[in-house]
Amino acid sequence: MTIAIDHLDHMVIYAGDLERTLDFYSRVLGMRVERKVNRPSSLHFGAQKFNVHTAGREFSPRATRAMAGSADFCLIASTPIDDVVAHLRNCDVTIELGPTERDGATGKIRSVYFRDPDDNLVEVSNYI
């Protein structure tokens, strides 16, 4: 038997400053913030979410070496990448690389890379 994985439901990112991280992802990437009592805050987009734990005050179970700034992930946008670049510049987000062509999970993508407030590497892409 093998396990057939269908898609990613959620992942956890660790924030040095929870409010700063929630603001960045909601303001810059349009993610919807959800807060719950005694549960992690979360950032919703499409059919997925990021749970956001404050570094040093994580919820259990958690990664063995949970720390802010250790994530590196790619988000697929329906917004054209040139418009993404313009929006990032308008939000005073420094673009680290791109737009550049890369290999995505199901084909070629055009990507732009930047850092969130905790120095996580964020890649936003369009399939070509």
Image (cartoon, rainbow, N blue to C red):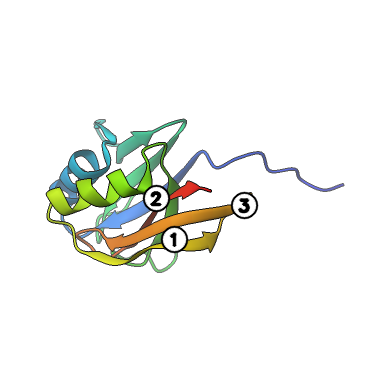
Q: Is residue 62 visible?
A: no
Circles 1 and 2: CB atoms closer than 8 Å: yes
Question: In which quadrant of the rendered view does residue 108 lie?
Answer: bottom right
Q: In this view, does 24 lie to the left or right of 73?
A: left
Q: Which of marks 3 and 2 is nearer the N terminus?
A: 2
Residue shown at 27% from the left, 52% from the top: 85
Three-letter amino acid code at the position of disc 1:
Ala
**Along the viewing direction, whichever of 27 and 63 lies nearer the viewer:** 27
Which secondary structure lies at badge 2?
strand
Residue 126, compared with residue 79, is above or below; it is below
What is the C-alpha distance between the residues marked 1 and 2? Answer: 9 Å
Three-letter amino acid code at the position of disc 3:
Gly
**Residue corresponding to mark 3:** 107
Question: In which quadrant of the rendered view does residue 4 lie?
Answer: top right
Residue shown at 42% from the left, 57% from the top: 111
**Residue corresponding to mark 2:** 12
Residue shown at 26% from the left, 30% from the top: 36
Q: Is residue 91 left or right of residue 63?
A: left
Q: Residue 63 carries which label?
A: 1
Three-letter amino acid code at the position of disc 2:
Val
Q: Which mark is residue 90?
A: none
What is the C-alpha distance between the residues marked 3 and 2? Answer: 26 Å
Q: Which of marks 3 and 2 is in front?
A: 3
What is the C-alpha distance between the residues marked 3 and 1? Answer: 30 Å
Mark 3 closeness class: few <14, some 14–19, many ≥20 residues within 10 Å: few
Circles 3 and 1: CB atoms closer than 8 Å: no
**Image location (x, y in percent) of residue 33:** 25, 33
Which secondary structure lies at badge 3?
loop
